[in-house]
């Protein structure tokens, strides 16, 4: 009973965190990415000049790492639950982990170089453009992974409700 | 006869379930979009306001936040109003009350959005003569305060919508024809 209570909390937080993460990434994909496609170096020069006070890191940290921990907690506390619920929790954890790994790659290989290096992007236009274009598919893959994690977390929550109803 | 009534009831429930899901996803998208703007966009307009505004305009040469919010926001609002309308005989009284709060929250956010778009965004981002530092700062500060109020309305909507959806889902799986 205590495990179900903990699982509800972990899963509830996971759902909230994944929705926060997914819609944040979706916002960037819709409102930002197309502006960067044609000439990344010029577009990102404007962006870097704009973000002098805050930047997207403020939105994603610490929520996204906490979401990963909550997904891990949900999987751990759901060990004694039905097979179908455990499968949904495992899928949520795996998709969230994929999102984390993709984020680590995107941040270390692209974002640090184009957003936080302080370098003149226009001076190395070719390299910057290639770097940004190379990163685009990874960003789309991350969006898909986090979307899938959100869908499986919702499915797990519905299964948990069903389990609770059957036990009552 | 009984089978027909049951079938009709199941269809009504499916439609309501779909409307609630669309409204929930759409309002979550709206909420987190506004949170993103509150954290990432607006504060940057408070330092060197006119220059920051120009950088924002130069950057958004292809798409801008409108692409994120339209048609999502009107679709979500419409789905919520329809769900509220269709829920009269389907939802338990408490859930119906929650859905009413969710609808009122969404209506509040819509009204605030109309004000923000017509009185602030059109001057700040879209057209008109270039505002000076003081004007951009005033508009940005007004936007930040009103956006916080809008986020509060959206939180009310998403929380009550989620509770309604879960209650409705539980009531459906308790019914014999769903067993």
Image (cartoon, rainbow, N blue to C red):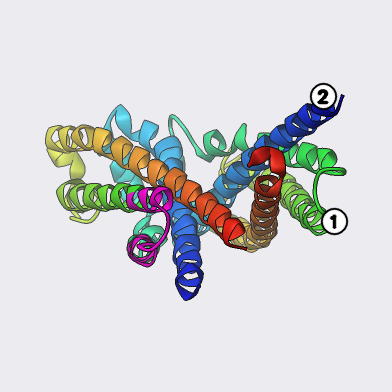
Q: Is residue B66 shown above or below B56?
A: above
Q: Which mark is residue B127?
A: none
Quarter occupied by residue A69: bottom left
Q: Is residue A67 magenta?
A: no
User: Considering the numbered disc 2 on the image, is that residue within a helix, a strand or a loop?
Assistant: helix
Same chain for the residues under marks 1 and 2 in the image? yes
User: Which residue carries the number 2 mark?
Assistant: B4
Prevailing SS of the magenta stretch: helix
Give whichever of A77, B134 is nearer the camera.
Answer: A77
Q: Is residue A122 shown above or below A109?
A: above
Quarter occupied by residue A68: bottom left
Side (left or right) of B109 relative to B45: right
Residue B174 coordinates in the image, percent (x, y): 68, 49
The C terminus of chain A appears in which quarter of the rendering? bottom right
Q: Residues within 10 Å of mark 1 (few under 14, many from 20)?
A: few
Count of numbered tags: 2
Tell me where the magenta segment starts and ends, as one range.
A69-90
Query: Among all residues in the image, which is located at the extreme bottom?
Result: A2
Instruction: Kindly identify which chain the residue marked by label 2 belongs to.
Output: B
Residue B141 coordinates in the image, percent (x, y): 60, 62
Side (left or right) of B46 relative to B161: left
Q: Is residue A162 shown above or below A144?
A: below
Q: Is residue A89 magenta?
A: yes
Q: CA distance from mark 1 to mark 2?
A: 25 Å
Give whichever of A138, A58 is nearer the camera.
Answer: A138
Q: Residues within 10 Å of mark 2 (few under 14, many from 20)?
A: few
Residue B160 coordinates in the image, percent (x, y): 70, 57
User: Which residue carries the number 1 mark?
Assistant: B93
- Among the two numbered marks 1 and 2 on one chain, the one whose residue lies closer to the N terminus: 2
Residue at the location (74% across, 33% down)?
B10
Residue at the location (42% across, 54% down)?
A82
Residue A2 coordinates in the image, percent (x, y): 48, 75
């Amino acid at each position: 009973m205590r495990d179900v209570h903990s699982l509800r909390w972990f899963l509830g937080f996971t759902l909230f965190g994944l929705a926060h993460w997914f819609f944040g990434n979706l916002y960037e994909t819709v409102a930002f990415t197309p502006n960067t496609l044609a000439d990344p170096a010029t577009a990102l020069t404007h962006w870097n000049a704009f973000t002098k006070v805050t930047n997207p890191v403020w939105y994603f940290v610490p929520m996204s790492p906490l979401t990963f921990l909550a997904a891990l907690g949900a999987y751990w506390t759901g060990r004694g639950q039905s097979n179908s619920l455990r499968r949904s929790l495992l899928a949520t954890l795996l998709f969230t982990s994929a999102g984390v790994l993709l984020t680590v790659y995107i941040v270390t290989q692209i974002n640090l170089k184009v957003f936080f290096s302080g370098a003149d992007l226009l001076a190395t236009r070719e390299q910057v453009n290639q770097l940004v274009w190379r990163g685009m598919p990874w960003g789309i893959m991350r969006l898909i992974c986090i979307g899938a994690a959100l869908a499986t977390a919702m499915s797990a929550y519905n299964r948990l409700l069903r389990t609770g109803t059957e036990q009552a | 006869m009984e089978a027909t009534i049951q079938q009709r009831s199941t269809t009504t429930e499916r439609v309501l379930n779909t409307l609630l899901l669309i409204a929930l996803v759409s309002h979550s998208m709206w909420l987190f979009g506004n949170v993103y703007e509150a954290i990432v966009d607006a504060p940057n307009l408070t330092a060197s306001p006119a220059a920051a505004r120009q950088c924002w305009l130069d950057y958004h040469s292809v798409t801008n936040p409108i692409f994120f919010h339209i048609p999502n926001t009107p679709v979500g609002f419409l789905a919520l109003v329809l769900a509220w309308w269709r829920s009269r005989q389907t939802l338990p009284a408490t859930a119906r009350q929650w859905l009413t709060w969710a609808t009122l929250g969404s209506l509040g956010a819509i009204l605030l959005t109309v004000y923000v778009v017509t009185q602030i965004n059109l001057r700040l981002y879209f057209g008109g003569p270039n505002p000076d530092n003081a004007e951009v700062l005033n508009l940005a500060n007004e936007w930040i305060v009103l956006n916080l109020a809008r986020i509060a309305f959206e939180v009310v909507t998403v929380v009550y919508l989620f509770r309604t959806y879960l209650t409705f889902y539980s009531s459906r799986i308790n019914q014999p024809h769903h067993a």
